[in-house]
Amino acid sequence: MTEDGKSQAALWILTAAFIANFPAVVAAKSPNVVFILADDFGWYDVGYHSSEIRTPNLDRLSAKGVRLENYYVQPLCTPSRNQLMTGRYQIHMGMQHQIIWPCQPYCVPLDEKLLPQLMKEAGYDTHMVGKWHLGMYKKDCLPTRRGFDTYFGYLTGSEDYFTHHRCYNIPQLNLTRCALDLRDGEEAVTAYKGIYSTELFSQRAISIIRKHNSSKPLFLYVALQAVHAPLQVPERYVAPYSFIKDNHRRLYAGMVSAMDEAVGNISLALRQEGLWDNTVLVFSTDNGGQTLSGGSNWPLRGRKWSLWEGGVRGVGFVASPLLKKPGTVNRELIHVSDWLPTLVGLAGGSTNGTKSLDGFNMWNTISKGFASPRLELLHNIDALYNDIAPCPGRQSRLTLARGVSADSWASSSFNTSIHAAIRASNWKLLTGYPGCDVWFPRPGHNSSTSGSSKVDPLKPVMLFDVEKDPEERNEVSAKFPNVVDYLLNRLQHHQKRALPINFPDNDPRCDPGPTGAWGPWALD
Ligand SMILES: *[C@@H]1O[C@H](CO)[C@@H](O)[C@H](O)[C@H]1NC(C)=O
Ligand SMILES: *[C@@H]1O[C@H](CO)[C@@H](O)[C@H](O)[C@H]1NC(C)=O
Ligand SMILES: *[C@@H]1O[C@H](CO)[C@@H](O)[C@H](O)[C@H]1NC(C)=O
Ligand SMILES: *[C@@H]1O[C@H](CO)[C@@H](O)[C@H](O)[C@H]1NC(C)=O
């Protein structure tokens, strides 16, 4: 062997040793991931969007992290959670319509591989606290059967913050059933009656953090009940908001303060346990604020349950000492479906086993400010869309639906009476009835634009340059017919690949009885 050959051999041995040890090295250094999801938290409800509501912890964490200001979620609870857990658009699961109601016998399809399963395969301990809302009619649908080592929380979409009881009308049985919805693992638990859920869930998250053995990385998903209706909050959180005259907004502000404190407590526990230096904390809302329950998305148009920016542009940020450009505001296009590839990538894991992903790995975009790999965003396509809440200034939903039937794009391959929206770079196209389209006034301010007088009639096809016009005030489809054609074709492309909507009738066997708990009723 020549000298050269020897040194090459030595190098080869070193390299081989390095490769052999690599998985262990990576595993030891994999960052902890803590994902905090708020419920129905609106664009104008965070301090750093100049809200009158105070969120010192969210402001401080995000100021040292990266604020995501061109970040999108789905307009409703189940769809956002679904996309977070699968990295895929809900049209690919037949779940493009509404949410899962307590008695509907379906869940995120069991052949979808979920984020916690992938994190587990990457060597993580996986824990979930809070709201599931991805289906529970049979045991295989539960979080403990879908990748989480432990679970503590509630399975339906909303409930009482203190009693942890959910009331739901089951028309098939002609009764409204109020029953417990709180589980530790798979067992219903009655011992927490009277404890405010924002405190209950943050205490549980903190106890998981304290017990965590740091020889393994931690994946903790905290899906807070806050700040979804009902408007319930201990008095001490509301006291600082006596200046807010609107009763709903005042109570809501108190709920936001409790949530902000919960996030502060969780981040403090991570520091106290020495985990923070190697932790990535993500904070996100699940959809826009609900104006009927104190939320605000000002100055954006619309609200939760609509495809206007007020429904889908979300509050979100990442806080972590691992960020390469901390203290920045990020304006790259990022979507809730992007977390799965992003977090599995950070974990050093593999997305092998998932179906075709719609999300992108955004870590370089978030951490280093690189351009987003996402060129398009399908907000949704839902041929059965209906808005169940009243929309001020609009006479009735039916009038609107009829008003959008005839149009100049009628020959397009995509049926423009269908509720849909798609985004490509600065352009956003909406078809059908997008949902309540009001510019709700800034809380504490009156505004003439909230009435019906100044609102133009809705058109079946609407185009906005949301980069220049995030308030969606200037409809420009007539000026850019080529953009409209292109985006209608893209909608048709997605619609062809959508599964038929799965939205089953209530199964009356869901009834837990007066002393039972909401939970799995069907045999596997
Ligand atoms: C449903 O229940 C209400 C009150 O319990 C009763 O008055 C009504 O007759 C019931 N309707 C049917 C269709 O059974
Ligand atoms: C935060 O921690 C403090 C101190 O332990 C506690 O009093 C408070 O209830 C916690 N807040 C929440 C929302 O859990
Ligand atoms: C943490 O886990 C490692 C590896 O399994 C084990 O050796 C160690 O004893 C654990 N530490 C504690 C405090 O449980
Ligand atoms: C992906 O997973 C399958 C089945 O678990 C396995 O056979 C295959 O080797 C994996 N591929 C990669 C690239 O890890």
Image: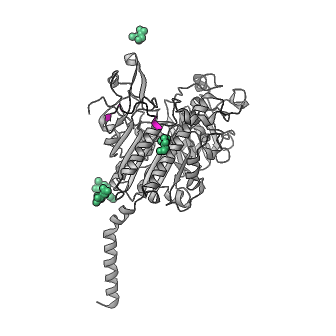
Of residue 279 and residue 338, the one placed in the foreground of this image is: 279
Q: Residue at x 62, y 48 (%)?
A: 426
Of residue 421 and residue 360, the one placed in the foreground of this image is: 360
The image's colouring method is: one colour
Predominant SS of the magenta segment? loop
**Side (left or right) of 292 relative to 180:** right
Whether residue 93 is visible here, answered yes or no, is yes
Q: Position of residue 102 (x, y in %)?
A: 40, 28
Residue 214's place in the image compared with 422, above or below, is below
**Side (left or right) of 220 relative to 395:** left
| Range of residues picked out in magenta | 187-198
Whether residue 355 is visible here, answered yes or no, is no
Q: Is residue 195 magenta?
A: yes
Q: Position of residue 282 (x, y in %)?
A: 49, 50
Q: Position of residue 167 (x, y in %)?
A: 43, 24
Question: Which corner quadrant holds the N terminus?
Answer: bottom left
Question: Which corner quadrant holds the C terminus?
Answer: top left
**Side (left or right) of 28 relative to 493:** left
Residue 346's place in the image compared with 203, above or below, is below
